[in-house]
Amino acid sequence: MTMFGSGAPIGSPLPQGQLIGNYRSYEAALSAVDRVVEAGVDPRFLSIVGRDLRSVYRLRHRPSYAAVAGRAALQGAFFGVFIGLLISMMSGGQDLAMTIGSTVVMGAVIWVLFGVIGEMMRRRQLKYAMIPSMTAVSYDLVVDNSVAGQVSSVLGPQPTATPSQSAPAPTPEQTEQPGAEANDQNNRGIPDLPDGRPQYGVRVDPTPDTDQDSDDSQTR
């Protein structure tokens, strides 16, 4: 199941409304939305927002050369059938079986050669297969204020985000930094990034030396 499709363009603002619940999986959030839609709520007023997007690269064993050759032969055979039909239509339908048979064999052979050679080149770079994906730590159900009461009555009490879900625990190096106390205060609102930087904007710390020099220059 994919969460991406033809919808709002990249960079569109986040949905505004009331946070109803926070779910650990996309399927759980989708199940809650299904219950609300079945109760008669317009789905245009509902949004699922993923928190803390992560890039996940799952590793797998590379397929054997026999599997690569078999898959390539099947693809080449289908392509050969298509080419054979085109050639037969252009030649008036003469020797249809022979034409399709020859194009199927040629397509399978060519696809097997390219498939095996491509697999050999990929194995020189990586000894394993890497499958990239995008996932979120948790998912918020955000609804428009006009239907917030109706959605709450349909779903009842829903799970909410905990501090451990919204931000990872600080490392000992981060807690020993001089700005750790300020980061803890900031975590009460929008949590910082794992390396201590703010999620939005830039944190500007006061510089006592500069302020003191400016005060001295004014008194002079």
Image (cartoon, rainbow, N blue to C red):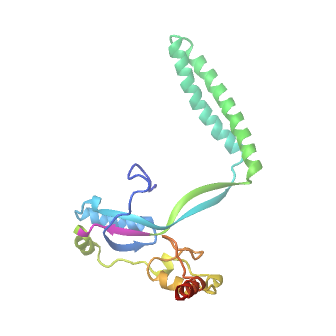
| 95 displayed left or right of 42 | right
Q: Nearer the viewer, residue 210 or 149?
A: 210
Q: State the image coordinates of residue 142 (x, y, percent, origin top left).
A: 34, 68
| 147 displayed left or right of 209 | left
Q: Nearer the viewer, residue 171 or 195?
A: 195
Q: State the image coordinates of residue 168 (x, y, percent, origin top left).
A: 55, 77
Q: Nearer the viewer, residue 50 or 179?
A: 179
Residue 119 visible to an observer of this rendering: yes
Q: State the image coordinates of residue 104 (x, y, percent, origin top left).
A: 61, 26
Q: How many marks?
A: 0
Q: Residue at 60% across / 17% down in the picture?
A: 98
Magenta region includes residue 94: no
Q: Nearer the viewer, residue 146 or 1?
A: 146
Q: Residue at 64% across / 87% down in the picture?
A: 176
Q: Quadrant of residue 41?
A: bottom left
Residue range highlighted in magenta: 139-145
Q: As displayed, is residue 43 above or below residue 95?
A: below
| 204 displayed left or right of 172 | left
Q: Residue at 38% across / 51% down in the picture?
A: 7
Q: State the image coordinates of residue 134 (x, y, percent, origin top left).
A: 53, 60
